Image (cartoon, rainbow, N blue to C red):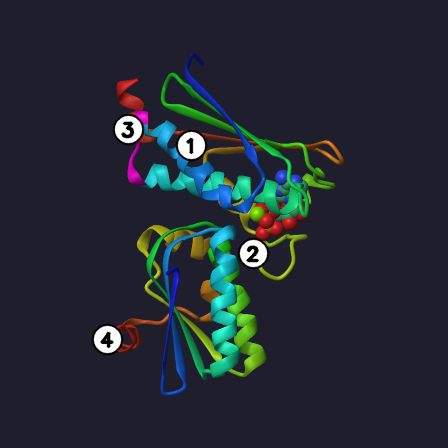
Amino acid sequence: MKLKNEMSLTFESRSSNEGFARSAVASFISQLDPTIGEITDIKTAVSEAVTNCIVHAYKESVGQIYINVKVYEGAVVVIKIKDKGCGIHDVKQAMEPLFTTGGEERAGLGFAVMQSFTDKVKVISKEGKGTTVTLEKRLMSRIKDV
Amino acid sequence: MDVKIITDHGEMTAKLYGEIDHHRAREMREMIDSAAERNKPSILYLDFGGVTFMDSSGIGLIMGRYRTMNLLGGEVRVLNIPKSMERMVELSGLSALNLFAKGSEKNEVKK
Ligand SMILES: Nc1ncnc2c1ncn2[C@@H]1O[C@H](COP(=O)(O)OP(=O)(O)O)[C@@H](O)[C@H]1O
Ligand SMILES: [Mg+2]
């Protein structure tokens, strides 16, 4: 796959940055002229991954969140969301719908949403080191022109 | 204002506006719960008609208010979920709880 464009972004794990993070990714992707539905899907999936860094990875502390977005030929978008937080003990279990370690207000649906709203989700995590979530989505509406 | 609370004949409506994520949901939750504890409504309507975006924090907000109202001895109804967020609701399995109001109930509350 030929790389067409790329951007990276680093910001602190403050909940007030959740809106900024998903909007920044959406606005980068908007060059590909996606449908509103595709933009919403990407914003939703990014919001889930970034929230997980804030709520789970860094919990009470504040750390850095790294986002990298690559656009490949064929309108394939690959988004990496990385933290250097606590890591995930059992990734398979964490990805099960409704599983949460986050208490009452968490729905345990973050990974299920990422999976449903993108084409591919990859999670690499190491306890005590951090987690990288990779989201991949092909923008169907633009396949013809790229 | 992200939440507008309306009380009427022992029922309470919380109209939600803007984007619901983990950050915004916290303030919304605090406003709704403190009003519910004060008013002890028989039914709490959560009106999503003004919501422009939500991630799974919106589902957490509904589930949490379902628990709050259970403790207070009342019920929760969810109104006007935007089309673009229906997939999220389906994914959550919340539809099984019958919280989502149908036609006539909707109109009653909207007026
Ligand atoms: N970046 C992360 N760092 C550490 N733990 C994580 C991370 N992302 C997810 N998790 C773990 O996976 C669980 C499931 O995540 P998710 O499906 O988003 O549900 P929720 O956020 O509602 O708990 C979390 O409760 C947490 O234990
Ligand atoms: Mg989550």
Say whether mark 3 and mark 1 are on the same chain. yes
Q: Are marks 1 and 4 in contact (CB under 8 Å)?
A: no
* Residue that appears at 36% across and 31% down: A27
Q: Are marks 1 and 2 in contact (CB under 8 Å)?
A: no
Label 3 neighbour load within 10 Å: few <14, some 14-19, many 20+: few
**Ligand 1 appears in which quadrant?**
top right
Question: Pointer 3 indicates a residue of which chain?
Answer: A
Q: Secondary structure at mark 2?
A: loop
Q: Give, as a single range, the part of the protein colored magenta.
A: A31-36
Closer to the eye: label 1 or 2: 1
- The x, y position of residue B96, in whole percent, is 48, 66
- The x, y position of residue A16, in whole percent, is 50, 45
Tell me the kind of residue under disc 2. Answer: Ala
Q: Which residue bears the numbered disc 4?
A: B111
Say whether mark 2 and mark 4 are on the same chain. no
Tell me the kind of residue under disc 4. Answer: Lys
Q: Secondary structure at mark 1?
A: helix
Q: Which residue bears the numbered disc 3?
A: A33
Q: Quadrant of residue A26?
A: top left
Q: Secondary structure at mark 4?
A: loop
Q: Which residue bears the numbered disc 1?
A: A25
- Mark 1 or mark 2, earlier in chain: 1
Relative to A126, is A110 above or below?
Answer: below
Q: Is residue B50 visible?
A: yes
